[in-house]
Amino acid sequence: MFTKNDKVETDWLAGVAMFSGFDQEQLMQVAQLGERLEAAAGAELTDQGRYGGTCYAIVEGSANVYMNGQFVASVGAGSMIGEMALLEHRPRSATVVAETDLLLVAFDVKAFGELLDANPTAKERLNNLLTERISDNQARKDQ
């Protein structure tokens, strides 16, 4: 499902919305904490209802998001996947499947926590992202 490659390149990290505007030192820190992965089209990144210990930043490609078996969104380069489950220590809220081949940066719980603790900008962006996701999820439930 995933192919690992030890080296995370800082030049393409700058294209991920969560990390855009980071200086070279901040990008190096992200690169050291993250793991570069490739996923083939059709690979399941998260499974709704299961606990997960990894979140992903999509660097290249696109994936589809499903809630309760229903398509709800397509996400692409710059998107974060799985961060809510890591932060809230609860099951995944959606299933995410690679629509195309993907280039990803993966963070385990410890690395993601270190990234947020060391970088106030990342923490602020994540808080904004979570607020948006919670609002979107609530809107879907209300339909």
Image (tube, rainbow, N blue to C red):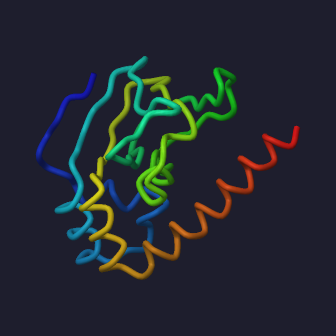
Q: Which of 24 and 105 is in front in this view?
A: 105
The single residue placed furthest to the right in the displayed view is 143
Q: Looking at the image, how many numbered discs can be counted on the residues?
A: 0
Residue 74 horizontal/vertical position (percent): 61, 34
Please tell me which residue is depicted at 26% across the width and 65% down the height of the picture.
30
Q: Give the image quarter of residue 109.
A: bottom left
Q: Give the x, y percent position of residue 8.
A: 20, 52
Above or below: residue 118 compared with residue 52: below
**Residue located 86% across and 43% down the image:** 142
Residue 116 falls left or right of residue 137: left
Q: Nearer the viewer, residue 10 or 87?
A: 87
Instruction: Report which quarter residue 121 is drawn in.
Output: bottom left
Quarter that holds the N terminus: top left
The residue depicted at 88 percent of the width and 38 percent of the height is: 143
Q: Is residue 124 above or below residue 42?
A: below
Percent coordinates x, y for residue 24 in the rendering: 26, 74
Residue at the limit of the structure toward the top, as seen here: 42
Q: Is residue 78 left or right of residue 129?
A: left
Q: Extreme left residue here?
A: 6
Residue 60 image-quadrant placement: top left
Q: Measured from the top left, where is residue 83 in percent x and y?
A: 45, 53
**Up-down relation of residue 108 to residue 25 (above or below):** above
Q: In this view, does 103 lie to the left or right of 6?
A: right
